[in-house]
Image (spheres, helix red, strand yellow):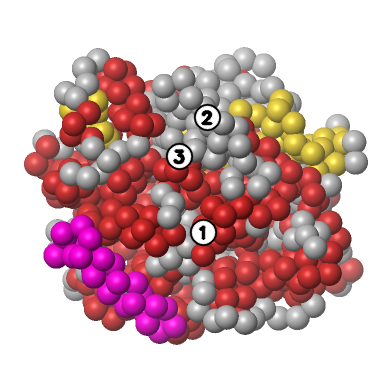
Amino acid sequence: MNNPLLDFSGAPRFDLVTPEHVQPGITELLSEARALIETLTRPEAPASWEGFVAPLSDMTDRLSRAWGVVRHLHSVLDLPPWREAYNNALPEVTRFFAEVGQNAALFERYKALAARADFASWPRARRKVVEDAVRDFRLSGAELPDADKPRFQAIQEELAGLSAKFSENLLDATNAWHEDFADESGLAGLPPDSVATARAVAEKAGVSGYRLTLQGPCVMAVLRQADNRGLRERIWRANATRASEFSAEIGHPEWDNGPLIARILTLREEAARLLGYPSHASVSLVPKMANSPAEVIDFLLDLARRARPSAERDLAELREFAAASLGISDLQPWDMGYAAEKLRQARYDFSEEALRQYFPEDKVLAGLFGVVSSLYGVSIRADKAPVWHEAVRYFTLSRDGQDIGHFYLDPYARDTKRGGAWMDEARSLRDTATGRETPIAYLVCNASPPAAGRPALYSFDQVITLFHEAGHGLHHLLTRVAEPGVSGINGVEWDAVELPSQFMENFCWEWEVLSGMTAHVDTGAPIPRDLFERMLAAKNFHAGLAMLRQVEFALFDMRLHSDFNPADGNALALLQEVRKEVAVIHPPAWQRFPNAFSHIFAGGYSAGYFSYHWAEVLSADAYSAFEEAAEKTGSVLDRATGERFMQEVLGVGGSRPALESFTAFRGRAPKPDALLRHHGMITA
């Protein structure tokens, strides 16, 4: 086999694959796929699972795995050759899937399968695959008049290119900014590890002194801890205006995502109207749990109403503290994190930096793996596989003596990697002629790398992020469903897919978990119980502000895609309207938040950002079952409850509706009480 991109015998061949393999490899797979579709849609071809769905699924799986490697490398190794290879192949891949989605012959075959007299007796997973396919064909324009299909296909191709460009502009704008310092005096307040990282970044760039950048860990360190107010303002402004018209000031007007946003919104609206829907949001909600944009907006406004009194108190006390204790009478956005950190220290007698010393990476990983073992009887061991960067690690999961899945962990921020954190699939659980293929996942974070000879130290927020992404990974890896279309995270309603991830975050707040996953980097001592109690007391510190901020983003997203006409205004004007309605903090008019909102413009969350809140109701209620078990057993790491959660939620993937899975686990419909209690908004 000459092209490692086409080697599907095991884990991806990151040791061999190069950008030069992309075009010939993807072209070959697309050619094979088109030939297979032609064969499967001949009149004499069998309309059965084995004769139609299975070979089509096998073909799609091969193409998705190969393209997934390319897409993944574009996200984590965004060097010019990989960017070029990805962008060159993207139009053809997009065109192919648009063609498939509009293929009337394939659509008719799936409808015929769903209409079979024996369809009700098929295994649940297979029925769900067919039902989802019929729905997705309709959403892909299969029922459009022939005259409209080319336009719909062209829209999908252009949208794919625009999303890729949005992400690239944001990465380029992020990497372009830096500020250098000849000595440490300009970095007053920053913790030693952040100073060491700044020195290492400068050395790598070939300059003396220290360099600050817009990489996530650096931005957070400066905004929370830098004593220099002017520095905080400069880095906040640079971060808040990335990929906007302000990029012209540094000679790169082509990085402005503003025109891309307008074009993306226009195309999404046009596609929705071609399909007969009033808005992109209406299309987006078809495969979700929520029924309508109005229902989502009402849900978000109700959350805002509940959170606002708490948020107003949070802001008032922060302003009072900043004026009285810090001499900041005109609290600005670049002061918020700094003042909040100082207030937290004053009130709860600990700092985020002091806390970080207790979370060396390997200890955190051991703690995470211990939770997984206790809940699900699954062991996790370090393993070997080709990787794309020296910092990446590979692990294997085993249960009852058998390997059941694998995952890569890419933990640190770097300049070739997009920001944020995410989980993606490299391979799904499936049965083949040669045996069962176990699932493989990517877990990607952007924590601070090791510095000055010390291990990587995680902030507590980064610990929570790791547990969150691990929850997604477990959803994919612990599946029992071997049909790729509904295995693991596949086929799960988008507004429920955050349930397993947010669920895992709760364990970070349990003493029996935290005490065993901490060791001070200098002394090796576990975190003291009194410090944990202060952390717990501070858990809902400014929870109202945090919730209201996320509601603002979600409401902006939903209204942007439901009742906003890009021809009549701009996204910034709508954002200001949303802020007037729900926000208590109003950033400067020059902030360009939408230009960096990659979740909805370069990710899968358009008209779906509300999913974080929607799923949080489910996750908090699911976790309350473990709290109830702890009242009887003394431990939230209750194996019996964990086994039920694995069997009824994680294990079934998308093979049945998420609400049905939740009800099977909890024994009832979800209630919001646990969510409000976890955020300190009700006490019982």
Instruction: Using the numbered discs, state the Cα–Cα distance from disc 2 to disc 3 in whole angstroms.
Output: 24 Å
Which residue is located at x 37 percent, y 49 percent?
163
Q: Are marks 2 and 3 in contact (CB under 8 Å)?
A: no
Instruction: Determine whether the residue tagged by mark 2 lies in a helix, strand or loop.
Output: loop
Question: Residue 551, image x and y in percent?
Answer: 40, 71
User: In the rendered structure, which disc, 2 or 1, sits on the residue that comes first in sequence?
Assistant: 2
| Magenta segment | 304-331
Is residue 306 on the magenta stretch? yes
- How would you rate the neighbour count of disc 2 (Cα within 10 Å): few for under 14, some for 14-19, many for 20 or more? few
Question: Residue 412, image x and y in percent?
Answer: 47, 33
Which residue is located at x 61 percent, y 52 percent?
529
- Identify residue type, mark 3: Asn
Say if 186 sits above or below 331 in the image. above
User: In the rendered structure, which disc, 1 or 3, sits on the residue that comes first in sequence?
Assistant: 3
Q: Which residue is mark 2?
A: 522
- Identify residue type, mark 2: Asp
* Location of the N terminus (image quadrant): top right
Q: Locate residue 634: give its quadrant.
A: bottom right
Is residue 387 on the magenta stretch? no
- Identify residue type, mark 1: Arg
Point out the frontmost of discs 2 and 3: 2
Q: Are marks 2 and 1 in contact (CB under 8 Å)?
A: no
Q: Are marks 1 and 3 in contact (CB under 8 Å)?
A: no
Q: Which residue is mark 3?
A: 446
Question: Residue 534 — which label?
Answer: 1
- How would you rate the neighbour count of disc 3 (Cα within 10 Å): few for under 14, some for 14-19, many for 20 or more? many
Front residue of this view, candidates 317 and 138: 317
Answer yes or no: is residue 95 visible: no
Front residue of this view, candidates 270 and 279: 279
Give left or right: position of 143 versus 503.
Answer: left
Question: Residue 287, image x and y in percent?
Answer: 58, 68
Instruction: Determine whether the residue tagged by mark 1 lies in a helix, strand or loop.
Output: helix
